[in-house]
Amino acid sequence: MTLPHRDPPWVFRTYSGHTSARASNELYRLNLTKGQTGLSIAFDLPTQTGYDSDHPLARGEVGKVGVPICHLEDMQALFEGIPLGRMNTSMTINATAAWLLALYVAAAERQGADPKTLAGTTQNDIIKEYLSRGTYAFPPEPSLRLISDLIAYSVDAMPKWNPINICSYHLQEAGATPVQEIAYAMANAIAVLDAVRARPDVPKQALPRVVGRISFFLNAGIRFVEELCKCRAMGELWDEITRERYGVEDATLRRFRYGVQVNSLGLTESQPENNIIRIVLEALGVTLSRDARCRALQLPAWNEALGLPRPWDQQWSLRIQQVLALETDLLEYGDLFNGSPVVAAKVADLKRTAREEMERVLAMGGAVAAVENAYMKRRLVESQTARLRAIEHGELQVIGLNCFTETAASALVEGARSILRIDEFAERDQIEQLHAFRARRNDADVQAALTSLRDALANGQNVMPPSIRAAHAGVTTGEWAGVFRSLYGEYRAPTGVAVSVAPAADEALTGLREQIRRLGERLGRPPKMLIGKPGLDGHSNGAEQIAVRARDVGMEVVYEGIRLTPGEIVSSARDEGVHVIGLSILSGSHGVLVVDVLEGLRKAGLERIPVVVGGIIPEDDAAKLRAAGVARVYTPKDFDLNAIFGEIAQLVAESAAA
Amino acid sequence: MRRDRDAVPEALNLLDDRRPGQREAALALLDALESKISRSEAKPSGAVLRDAPRIGLTGAPGSGKSTLLDALVRALRKRNETVGIVAVDPSSRVSGGALLGDRARVRAGAGDRGVFLRSMAARERLGGLADATWPSVAVLAAVFDRVFVETVGVGQSEAEVAGLVDTLVFVAQPGAGDVLQFMKAGILEHPDVFAVNKADLGAVAERTASELQAALAMSARDATGWQRPVLLVSARDGRGIGELVAVLDAHRAHLVASGALAERRKRARSSFALDALERRYGTFGIERLGGREAVRARLLAEPEGGGNAFGLGLAREIEAALGKSR
């Protein structure tokens, strides 16, 4: 039987990495034998934020949400037996992207590969880190310089490399509507391209080639028809912007190239098997339309809301892609939607409203200005608040969560065995290996490499070449980032919570507000709550929603933001005189960090203050936390925020009475 | 009563407690505090507490007050000064709740025992202050080397904050037309120091500074003879932060030399006591003693410390008068 001609499939990837370079290497090789056609590297939080595994802030985080990479030998171990000259590698790395790419290039050179042959992507998008993901390290200006250094370097030295992946993915996770996702992604791309265009080392005639290397990283939600239209709208807008603003004549260089990770926000902890259906439909949204089809796709695992997925869970998601691309007839047809008046109208509407919002951002000085004045963040927090409220009120139906919650026992969920457990000695082993590496490297080489990096920065030279030399010399991730930290300091992005507006008439809130008001009378002042995120996890969307709701029910809220040490949380709880502490952790480091907070409170004589914890926390971990003294543990299935605050008010009342 | 950092949080909790019994305890604490405070500029020792400079920081939302405060705290910590901060944010009219945002922006001193930050909600007060702001500042001033009050400027709040601190710094954001708005809102009358933030923006900031200077030309010197300076500062690149600290010190020295400091302190204390009496007994109660101005005059004449200050004595009189009239 002869089959009709088929388009080549998109690149199949799975976002993965954990424990150590060696363990992740095994996983990658296994995934490649299963038919994965590219790699997508997840780095752990210390690596993403520029700390070595033995830094105090790294405690509890090493190897948790990704692989720890401290130096060249870690990077070489990660790709042992994987020829980099023939691989397509996507690295989710932003604040420290220039450094991880330097290590990747150095590792490839040690394999004997020419950097010109390297294909793949560094995410390298700092703006969305300030808005949503939170793994930034330096202030916006030096960050933008690092981004544009990487772009300017790679456009000639690594012509097959996508130096930046403008991410709208994390904007949708933070609550963005499709219009916001389009508008802010475009404004972000403009900020980056304007910065590159302003560089003296990028000649005018090179700009179109730079434009041609810009790629995007999108989200795909469950409203998959709208998502399909969103992708088409972005393609048309990008074509217009690159022609109008950057004068790119060659249509192929104006092509909107994008990869996708489908939505994690909509995956549920209750009836988690339903997630596989969501994932399939979301994958359709970004593959059905040939003219707006993704170039690479990564699908989450069905059990992500429960904890870290196992190899089998990831394999199941890979099989979805393979069935869709290789078994169905999807790739045999031209575009299915050209000429559809319904799709055309929706696309035109998205384009028009997104352009209006984009122009608003440009009018206030562009994406960087709209980060610093918190405009975009505020809009995202507002959208997320509206979305969660719609779920609470049942206007937005989420099957198995707020409707059709009756269920037989799941055949797939078997308690602690349904997720992957990180070896508890991984952190200790990694630190031991790091110390051994530092002991055997040549210190004089390291110091010389760091000096030439500092000189390059001071002289306005591109940091990539000295970073690659530093990688070969044995510089570590923490040392490289330390050069930038010492020059530019730490940065704290605006939170956007303080400016969001409380709803006036909300009947569900009235009774709760009365309960909180009476509690305030008993306490002598309104109940005060401290909300913070210990550790390096920067996903602050959940903590922000809790902070906003606490205000809306009548509490006084000290919102501490991200990246706090347990000691800082204890001292602010004491100095601020709070009645209750809420901690949010999504990185799986809750075991160590929450226990450290409880211990600190005990030492400070503050053990009467109840502590509640929210995050992705498996049930047996939750039991351990409760045994250690945590008053309540909330997970994604607890969507009714008013019920949560009713319980918190009760806890405060009990602790005041005790 | 000692210069004890560990005792500060509980003291501030008490000062914020509205339950009747706790209110008397709070006033008694303030009264006891007053009697231990040294009015001399020398470093205090033993049981004598210091009365640290109190500095207000106001400005419109987005003017960068918090980041400027962050930079100031860093500079002062380098000089080994300890810093106490009260940051006030408005409460939601609808829910009564509040988001107190500064923790995320003022990072200097996170986990540093030389820095203390208490954020408070303004609650039902419309200006930029809370009922507990002044007494909290009084407690912090006894323990830390310098105290800041940070609050959103909304026009009328400048006058209120000016009545509570020794030195009021107005943080202006560069931008055309702003100065006219400041004048309309009557903001320019109160501050002792003007800091045009975001000097790194260059020409825009310089223009705002010179417009401010021109607007102040008629009233550059205040009643105490202080020449009100306009500074260009940048929390971002640190420009002008050292100068700002020097100006704060100079204004403090001027207040001490001119005798205005004692006067300001007395006025602030009696305003607080008057507000507290009015909250407790209402206009009706205040009228028993002859109305606001009569009560204020008596409060101003009160001796510091000794069990009757902060209107404790007047409260007993009002209660007696109300008892009779019942």
Image: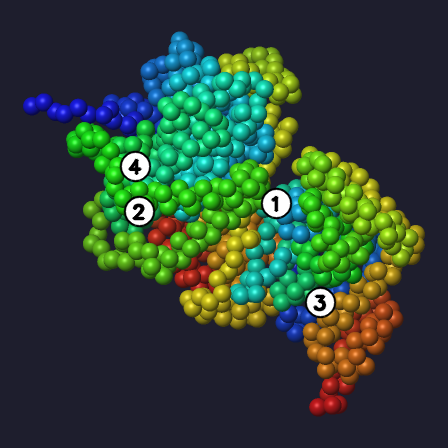
Q: Nearer the viewer, mark 4 or mark 1?
A: 4
Could you tell which of marks 4 and 2 lies nearer the N-terminus?
A: 2
Discs 3 and 2 lie in a common subunit: no
The amino acid sitting under disc 3 is Ala
Q: Is residue A222 above or below residue B34?
A: above
Q: Which residue was labeled with disc 2?
A: A223
Image spot of residue A197 (x, y percent): 54, 25
Name which residue type carries label 4. Val
Question: Residue at horizontal 63%, vertical 57%?
Answer: B89
Numbered disc in front, either 1 or 2: 2
Residue B28 point in image, percent of width and height: 75, 68
Residue at mark 4: chain: A
Q: Are marks 4 and 2 in contact (CB under 8 Å)?
A: no
Residue under pointer 4: A286
**Which is nearer the eye, A9 or B266?**
A9
Q: Residues within 10 Å of mark 1 (few under 14, many from 20)?
A: many
Q: Position of residue A608 (x, y in %)?
A: 54, 58
Figure label count: 4
In the picture of the structure, the residue carrying the numbered disc 1 is: B105
Spatial CA distance of label 3 from label 4 is: 64 Å
Relative placement, left or right, of A631 versus B104 is left
The verdict on a common chain for dots 3 and 4 is no
Sequence-earlier tag: 3 or 1: 3
* Residue in front for this viewpoint, B243 or B178: B178
Q: Secondary structure at mark 4?
A: loop
